[in-house]
Amino acid sequence: MDNVTPLGGDVYEIDTRMAGYSGITAGYLILGDRPCLVETGTSTSAPVVRDALSSLGVGPDDLATVVVTHIHLDHAGGVGDIAGYYPSAEIVVHEKGARHLADPSRLMASAKMVWGDKLDVLFGTLAPTDAARIRALGDTGTIDLGNGRTLASHYSPGHAKHHVGLLDSHTGDLYVGDAAGVYLPETGDLRPATPPPDFDLDVALGSIALFTALQPQRLLFSHYGPVDDVSPILERSAEELRIWVDLTKQARAEGLDLDHAVAMVRERTRERYAALRAGDATAEQFELLSGAPSNVAGIMHWLDLIPR
C-alpha cells in the first residue's frame, strides 16, 4: 500500500491520512511475535489503519497490543474503532488517560469546545473501549512484543499530563508522540506543540532531557516520521520551546491580547521555518498540527498559573 513505509527492524510507518491529508499523523506497526500498533490516528482514519495492517498480514485476531502516547484525538481518536476491529488486542495508555478511553464523553465535549464544527471533519468521534481491555501505565511500564523484545514506557508530560514515550529494546527507536514537538520531513522544520491546558515549560524540558538520557538510536515522530539525528533534534526541541515561551512572555508583558500575541509570535518565528517561508501545502500542515493560536494559548495558560 502507498501509505505503508518499512523502516527496518520489523517497524512499519502507516500514514493514517488524517482528514484526507498525507504526512499529518503516523501510526507505527511493530510486527514482532506479538504485533503492536503505536498510535491509532483519528476515528475517521481507523479504516485506513485497518487496511494497512491487513496489507501487512495482520488480521482481526493477530494484533496483540494497541498503545497510544497520549489521548489527544489525532493520536488516540481511533482507539475505540481499532479495539472493535481487533478483539484480542490489549489497549495500553498512561493511567491519567485510561478513564477517558473507557468513557470519552468529557474528552469529546472538551474537543468540541476547541474545534467546533471542524471536529467531525478532522477527528470524528472517539468510541468507548471496554475498561476490562485497558491497561493503565504508571510512570514506567513494559509492553511485551514477543521473543524478549519490549517497549519500555516512560512518563513524559509537559505537552499533556497523560503522555508517555516508548523505547523499543530491539531497535532503540523512541516513539516521542508530541513531547518533542512537530517535525516536517519535507523541510526538516521542528516546531513545539504547547496546547492548553497541560503545557508546562519546565516539565516539558524535563521530558526532553529524559529522552536524551534514554540514548535512543532514532526518534519516531507521530507528526511525522523517523529522525536519525537524535541529539541535534532534541536540542532544537528544547530551544524551540524556550523561544516560543520567551516571545509569548514579551507579548504578555506588553499587554497584548491573545490575537495580537499570536500575530507577534507568528511574525517573529516565521523565519525559523522553511515551510512557512515557502508558503506551500506544508505550511498548512504546520498550522493544522502546531498552530500558533494553540501554542500561544497554551503558553499563556501556563503563565497565568505561575505566581508572579
Image (tube, grey):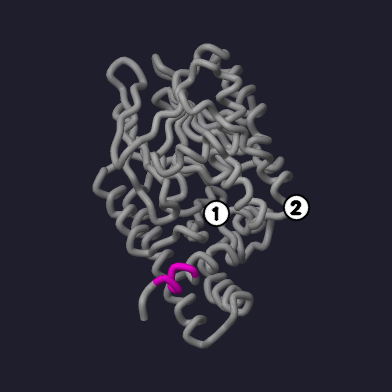
Tell whether 95 sits left or right of 4: left
Q: Nearer the viewer, residue 33 or 12?
A: 33
Tell whether 284 sits left or right of 220: right
Which quarter shows the N terminus? top right
Q: Position of residue 9 (x, y in %)?
A: 39, 25
Q: Nearer the viewer, residue 224 or 6?
A: 224
Q: Secondary structure at mark 1?
A: loop
Q: Position of residue 129 (x, y in %)?
A: 55, 29
Which quarter shows the C terminus? bottom left
Residue at 57% over, 14% down = 60
Name the residue tied to disc 1. Answer: 187
Q: Which residues are magenta?
A: 301-305
Residue at 47% over, 36% down = 68
Q: CA distance from mark 2 to mark 1?
A: 31 Å
- Give, as a three-letter code, the residue at label 1: Thr
- Give, as a three-letter code, the residue at label 2: Asp
* Residue 215 makes an appearance in the image: yes
Tell whether 83 sits left or right of 51: left
Q: Position of residue 177 (x, y in %)?
A: 45, 44
* Residue 7 makes an appearance in the image: no
Residue 276 covered by magenta stretch: no
Q: Secondary structure at mark 2?
A: loop
Question: Quick check: 223 above or below 265?
Answer: above
Tell whether 223 sits left or right of 117: left
Name the residue tied to disc 2. Answer: 117
Which of marks 1 and 2 precedes in the sequence? 2
Q: Main secondary structure of the magenta part?
A: helix
Question: Quick check: 156 above or below 270?
Answer: above
Q: Residues within 10 Å of mark 1 (few under 14, many from 20)?
A: few
